[in-house]
Amino acid sequence: MKYFASVLFILSGMNIYCQKTYDYPDAPKDTTANTYFQETIEDPYQWMEDPDHPDLQNWLEEQEKLTKAQSSKQTRVWDLRSQIASMYHNVRREKTDDYVELDSKFEAKFDTKTDWNPYTGSMDFLYKFKDKKNWKKLINGKELAENNSDHILYGSTSINESENLLAIAVSLNGSDWAKGYIYDLTTGTQFPYVLENIRTGANFEWNGRDLYYPAYNKPEKGRELLDKAKGQVLYKLSLKENQATPETVYKNPDTTGTNGFRYDIENEQLRLYHSIKSRGTWYRAISIADLNKENFQPRRFLVYPSDDKTELKIIHTKNDSIFLRTNIGAPNGKVLLANLNTPNKLSEFIPEYDINLHYVNKLGKDKLACVYRKDGQNIALIHNMQGELLRKIDFPKGKKLNHFYEASDEAEITNFSISSFYHPNTQYQLNLNTLEFKPTESLSVPYDIENLETRYVTYTSKDGTEIDMYITCDKNTVLDGNNPVLMYGYGGYGKTVEPFFRNTTGLLLAHGGIMAVPNIRGGGANGSDWAAAGRRLNKQKAIEDFIAAGEYLINNKYTSPDKLVISGGSHGALLVEASAIQRPDLFKAVIAEAGPYDMLRFNLFTVGGVSLNLNEFGSPENPEDYKNLKAYSPLHNITKGERYPNTLLITGDTDDRVPPLHTYKFLAKLQELADPSGLYHLYVTPGSGHGGALSPEDNTDKLLYQYYFMFDQMGIEL
């Protein structure tokens, strides 16, 4: 075993290292190389793509020793543990005197929760009738485990309130592959059906006692972590019969698994979003089926181009009228109206405005809520069903509007909430007749909310584009370049990073830290054009936007390179690692979780080759995409002898969405080539995938390690 040398000092209870060098474990190398358009790319760690390779386990054991050596130097870990616990447990909520109890018929009939069972070492699933106090165990997680070491993850859950039925997806060790189980909540008994080969996020939809669900071909043994799901089929299982057999409703014509379908059900109407092929070209389509008919058949309602920019989604149906949200001819988004009996004919219902239409929801019997986003602020425009504007509500900047909808036609009052980076959701009530609203609870947390604020600033990226950024800090923060800053990034798939609360973020802020979140291109902060501007061949622009955010924070004296830590997960992990590789001088440390780092082979594994990711990144089989992917792929741009920011890579060892092979290969090359005075190490979460599935103990250990590392890098004293 190889050890690293360091001189350790204890200063105010935190570890500050006067580092010499780290002597990293050797990873075997081979002569594997791949050829792309007459260019040969060496890939000496490609053997790590085989999860059963005998050398991989030996290498991981050596990495674990390095990580444990780091962990053993955490001298104040119990103080950190108690402070984190305070952030979770010392949150108090109290309803105001004018809170109005909602009519029970408008609320969910059941409550559900997961509960760790220390006696069996597994996660159970509990439920109760909302008007009862006692929880009942519905699922004993241990009984669903195949091995004693398995971790149970509960995925999609759908409750049929009228029939007291529940369908739930359950996976082992965080895998995206799952099985489905059905329960009668009146008796707490399980139906004798197991839905095989489904996915954790499967959307179960009920229509009476009929359950609709998608499933796939059974994955090849040993390839579950590597191959993408194929053979998607929509099934109907009727619980009206004791020995029901799933009935095929729709088969995906794309058998390669590249183009998937999705669906939903409203008012006994199935809406299918799928792909069709005509004369060699794929198109997107929305088909609709009336589930009242005995032999229903989805019929095409709309057909439109299949590209990575076009969005078209049904938001509400009322009789034969169908309301849709789209960006076709409207990058900021607008609402269209169509008639069920007139295919491929759309009219404008609510026009495009100069602000981004974030989402549209039904709001009671006769209203639509259009929620817009501008300059870090949510703005709600409430319309009637004739398209007339009834009210505009400007919510506070730096806050996020949540649950602004009401499905019931009979409700007169509905609840919604507002959150921020520094406080959890705070509840409000909206009168659906007067459209007046009020706060209905007071909130107490273990730090002073009144001293905190979120600033919304604008900075300039490399190409001159103006980018917005949230900065959350104490109102009296001194801009002396000496503040610890955590900069979080995502920047992909048109996803908007809005003000979200994590209990541990409160701990950072309570210690005088700053949270920065830039709305870079590739995300959805400013509409679909903004998302496209950081997608595929424009991915480097998203990276440059993130780098420019770090420069802004340093130039404006919020922090310095010695105090700036960057963090991201999944696509965000790719973003922060690409930024660190390109500008190692700018950041003190990187925390990257479950990211793709080998962009020349990302498309070969699991979801990397589906249309969503091909649209986002392109394919190395295309010469233009290949050149672009190679230019920013973190694995392929490590420079020998470069001192990179201290790096903590986190991955689940059973992640089948972004397989851990990316993390392993990237770390091996980083440890081989980079300046060994930098700390580059790995934290593996056992028995967990992209979606988690950690035991409470494992989750706490991961959180403690991550925050101790971050605080240590920032110089924060506990």
Image (cartoon, grey):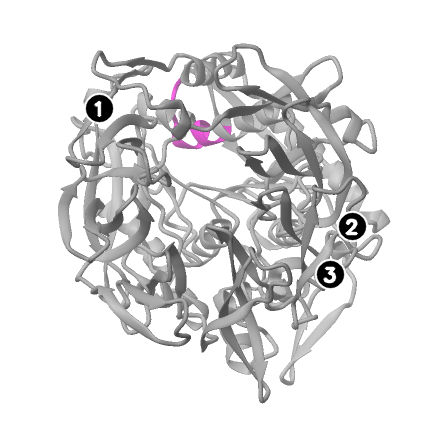
Residues at circles 2 and 3 in contact by the CB criterion of under 8 Å: no
Pick the quarter of the image with the N terminus.
top right
Residue 453 picture location, percent across and down: 21, 31
Q: Can residue 556 be seen in this view?
A: no
Query: Badge 2, how many Cα within 10 Å: few under 14, some, many 20+?
Result: few
Q: Which of marks 2 and 3 is in front?
A: 2
Pointer 1: what residue?
Answer: 439
Pointer 3: what residue?
Answer: 46
Res 23 → quadrant: top right
In the figure, 300 relative to 523: above or below?
Answer: below
Query: Disc 2 residue type?
Result: Thr
Magenta-colored stretch includes residue 669? no
Residue at horizontal 56%, vertical 36%?
Answer: 160
Give whichever of discs 1 and 2 has the lower sequence position: 2
Residue 166 picture location, percent across and down: 62, 34
* Label 3 secondary element: helix
Q: Nearer the viewer, residue 608 or 489?
A: 608
Res 423 → quadrant: top left
Specify start and end residues of the magenta stretch as a single range.
709-718
Left-right relation of 467 to 704: left
Residues at circles 1 and 3 in contact by the CB criterion of under 8 Å: no
Left-right relation of 221 to 214: right
